[in-house]
């Protein structure tokens, strides 16, 4: 069940990030057109694209965690040959990632709470909405990594 939830979170985050990137492209195109063609920059030209970019980046990270597509060196298999040792290190890595995401998400939640009563001047949206992207994405990524941690270890081929 946790794996299905992780799959659903990954699919939803990919869809949300894709829509956000499309919206961001449209916003930037509009702002550039307004700035250089009509010489009239919209008052929200910096704040709204930044808000969309932050949410797209953090929400997109959920899919990267699920698909294990984050950048990594991949040198560990050259130093550790045993499949059991590699599996143990992978589980320890997942556990450390979960702890790190929980701490980061908690700090992001505190920051969002501190800034909820402040508004962004151009778009009249709470500044906490920008910072809320961090705890939301961290909570979803924790669920994804929990599913990976609790998944059955892949069976290594016998040599």
Image: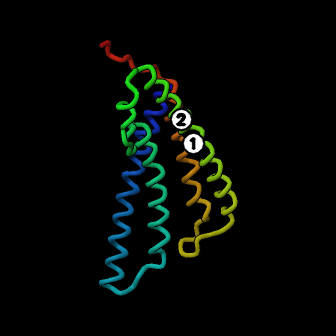
Residue at 37%, 24% (x, y): give it. 81
Query: Which x, y percent locates residue 64?
Result: 41, 43
For residue 12, the mark is none
Query: Which x, y percent locates residue 21?
Result: 37, 57
Badge 1 crowding class, 10 Å Cα cut-off, few under 14, some 14 to 19, many 20 or more, is some
Question: Does dot 1 land on a helix, a strand or a loop?
Answer: helix
Quadrant position of residue 68: top left
Quadrant position of residue 82: top left
In this view, the residue in front, 142 or 6, is 142
Q: CA distance from mark 2 to mark 1?
A: 7 Å
| Contact between labelled residues 1 and 2, with CB atoms less than 8 Å apart | yes
* Residue at the disc numbered 1: 139
In this view, the residue in front, 31 or 133, is 133
Is 121 on the left-hand or right-hand side of 48?
Answer: right
Residue found at the far bottom of this picture? 39
Residue at 42%, 37% (x, y): give it. 66
Residue at 55%, 45% (x, y): give it. 138
Is 110 on the left-hand or right-hand side of 98?
Answer: right
Query: Which x, y percent locates residue 146?
Result: 53, 31
Question: Is residue 44 placed above or below 25 in the rendered structure?
Answer: below
Quadrant position of residue 32: bottom left
Question: Does dot 2 land on a helix, a strand or a loop?
Answer: helix
Question: Is residue 140 placed above or below 32 in the rendered structure?
Answer: above
Query: Which x, y percent locates residue 33?
Result: 31, 78
* Residue at the disc numbered 2: 143
């Amino acid at each position: 069940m946790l794996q299905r939830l992780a799959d659903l979170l990954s699919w939803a985050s990919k869809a949300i990030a894709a829509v956000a990137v499309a919206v961001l492209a449209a916003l930037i195109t509009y702002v550039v057109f307004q700035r250089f063609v009509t010489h009239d920059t919209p008052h929200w030209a910096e704040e709204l694209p930044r808000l969309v970019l932050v949410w797209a980046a953090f929400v997109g990270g959920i899919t990267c965690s699920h698909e294990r597509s984050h950048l990594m060196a991949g040198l560990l298999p050259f130093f550790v040959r045993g499949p059991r040792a590699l599996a143990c290190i992978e589980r320890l890595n997942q556990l450390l990632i979960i702890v790190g995401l929980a701490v980061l998400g908690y700090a992001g939640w505190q920051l969002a709470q501190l800034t909820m009563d402040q508004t962004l001047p151009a778009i009249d949206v709470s500044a906490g909405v920008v910072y809320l992207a961090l705890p939301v994405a961290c909570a979803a990524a924790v669920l994804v990594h929990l599913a990976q941690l609790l998944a059955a270890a892949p069976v290594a081929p016998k040599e």
